[in-house]
Amino acid sequence: MPISILLSCVAVAIALGVMVWALAGTLQPARSRTLANLQRGLGAADAEGTQETGRGLELLGRRLTPPTFVRLLERQHARAGRPAEWTVDRLLGLKLAWVPTALALLLLVVATQQQPLLVMMTLVVGVAVYFVPELLLLSRGQERDQLIQQQLADTLDQMTIAVEAGLGFDSAMTRAAANGKGALADELTRTLQDMRMGRSRRQAFEDLAARSDVVDLRRFVRAILQADAYGISIGDVLRTQAAEMRLKRRQRAEEAAQKVPVKVLMPLMLFILPVMFIVVMGPAAMDMIAAFSNM
């Protein structure tokens, strides 16, 4: 057996073992939580050592991944709402497990003397799969930003009504977060939790703006921080922001409606008009062919 094929088989076996080890932790969350609870109180050093032992692959993935990629993944993870089932460390561990797998597949393709096009496709697929977590989190973050943008105007209306009824700003935001559903309610709830944990209002709202790419939400955060700094009435700020958000939502709807004819033009030219020409001109063309063929 050629040495290259043997090395490829060994690399594949090692990669599969690492992936099984990484997935074992995700398939047994109750066992992991139980072990973590049982190991509490054993001392900071022992607890830290046990945690590093239990999360060896995840910590290794964080250490070996370039800091730029780690920051990008953390940013996309926060924008996607921080899904608890797929933490950043777990994704880094799976990405690390994919590297030897991709290398093994590439060596196997090269060892079997395949066409250069197949080798290039294997390399491109390996690199693309490595960045799949970022792409999935990016897609989920974009969908979440759209939901936040749609819900912002109604949420501000609820907060305005609550403030004008006599509630404080924090109480109004708590009521809006409790009554609301979706991404914006979750973000408001997390902001309130940050303030209860001891963070200042400025820090909590700056984190709220940093977790999303919605321009309207960032504008609202800046208005609230300025009102808090200069003593402006929160009710007036909320009323102005709510009116502006409703206006922007109506403008976005009108803009989307105006884009419809442009988007329909290409399918119309490619699929509908040719069929109409065939139906209208087909019989005439067939009669002309028959007439000229009889001459």
Image (tube, rainbow, N blue to C red):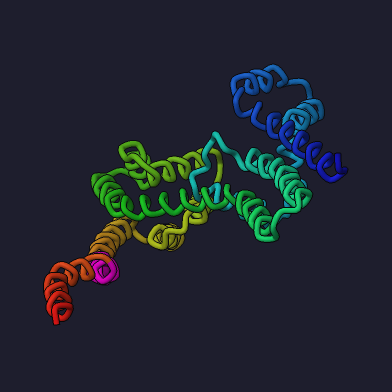
Residue drawn at the location 77% of the way across and 26% of the way down: 50
* Region rendered in magenta: 255-270
- Residue 276 falls left or right of residue 148: left
Image coordinates of residue 69 in percent, x first then y, are 66, 54
Q: Residue 63 appears at what percent x and percent y?
A: 76, 46
Q: Residue at x 28, y 58 (%)?
A: 242
Residue 262 magenta-highlighted:
yes
Tell whether 38 sits left or right of 213. Answer: right
Question: Where in the figure is residue 112, as x and y percent of width and height?
Answer: 75, 48
Instruction: Confirm whether residue 258 shows in the render.
Output: no
- Residue depicted at x 29% and y 70%: 266
In this rendered view, identify the residue nearer to me: 283 or 180.
283
In the image, 198: left or right of 6? left
Give the residue drawn at x 48%, y 56%: 209
Inspect the magenta stretch and tell me whether residue 43 lies in it. Answer: no
The answer to whether residue 282 shows anywhere in this view is yes
**131 vs 29, nearest the viewer:** 131
Quarter of the rendering containing residue 36: top right
Using the image as rendered, state which of residue 114 and residue 253 is in the foreground: 114
